[in-house]
Amino acid sequence: MPLPALLLHGFLGRGADWAPVADRLAATRRVLAPDWLDDVLADVPDLPSVPEDPEPPDVIAPAVGTLTWAADRLAGRLAAAGAPQADVVGYSMGGRLALLFAIRHPERVGRLVLVSASPGLKTAEERAERRAHDAALARDLAADLPSFLHRWTRQPVFASLTDAQRDAIEADRIMHVDPARAACALVAMGTGAMPSLWEPLRALHIETHAVAGALDPKYAALATSEAMTAAGVRATILPGAGHALLTEAPDALADLIVHRLR
C-alpha cells in the first residue's frame, strides 16, 4: 500500500493549490494537503507588528511560527491523522518546510520532492540581508495586500507568468490571505529566518528529488548544482515553465510527482 502523500503549499498559498496533483495521487493513495500556514499561525493569537530591524525569527513569534516549530508540529499532525509516515512534497516555502521536516523527523518520511525550493542561504551575512529585505516586504504586505500582490507577482522569479495567471493568483490571494498572518510568516519563515540546511541535506538518507522550471534560471541551476548532486538529490527540469509550477505546468508537475512517488 503506498504511503500517504503530504503536500505543502508555498507562501501566500493554500492546500487547494495542489488540486491537479492531489487529484492524480488520490487514485492510489491518501492525500493530505493542509492549509499549513493557517494551522501554524493559529497558535499566535496576537500577531506582533513587523519590527524595523528584525533579528532571527523568534522576535516575531516566540516559540511558535518558525519553520522549525512548524516542522515539529507537522509530525504531531501526521500522527493524529493516522499517518505516521508519508511521502512529502513541498513547493517553495513549503519545500523548505518539507526538507526541514525530513531532517528533523526522517523516520516519518518515505520520499521527498522539493518543488522550486532551496535548502537555504549558506552564510549568516546573506541571511541577515534577506531578513531585512523580507521585513520591508512584510510591512508593505500588512499595509496594503492588493498593492503588495501586484508587485509580488511581477518579481523576476515570476517573469514567465502570463497576465491572466497573475490576475488569477492575485484574486485568489486577496480572497484567502490574512495580511497580518502572511506578514508574520514572511519574517518568521522566510529564507533569511531559516537555518542553512545544506549540511543536514548531505547527511539525509531519504530519496530526494528537486524539481524546477526551465524558465526559472535560479532554481533550475540550484536543482542541478554540484552541491545538490553531491547530496544525492535527483533533479528534474520541466520545460516551458518557471517558478510557479503549480500554476504554469500543473499537469506536467502532477505527472512527474506521480511517477517519482511510484
Image (tube, grey):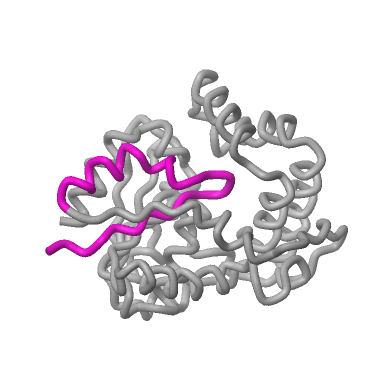
Quadrant, the C terminus: bottom left
Q: How many marks?
A: 0
Please state the horizontal and vertical placement of residue 128, each as a whole percent of the image.
73, 65
Q: Residue at x 35, y 39 (%)?
A: 19
Q: Nearer the viewer, residue 39 or 248?
A: 39
Image height of 162 relative to 35, above or below: above
Q: Is residue 262 left or right of residue 39?
A: left
| The quadrant where residue 108 appears | bottom left
Please state the horizontal and vertical placement of residue 140, each as a whole percent of the image.
79, 42
Please state the horizontal and vertical placement of residue 61, each as a whole percent of the image.
72, 68
Residue 5 in magenta?
yes
Q: Residue at x 43, y 63 (%)?
A: 98
Please state the horizontal and vertical placement of residue 260, each as a whole percent of the image.
21, 54
Q: Residue at x 44, y 47 (%)?
A: 15
Q: In the rendered image, is residue 156 in sight?
A: yes
Q: Is residue 145 left or right of residue 92?
A: right
Query: What residue range appears in magenta?
Result: 1-28
Q: Residue at x 35, y 67 (%)?
A: 81
Q: In the rendered image, is residue 126 in sight?
A: no
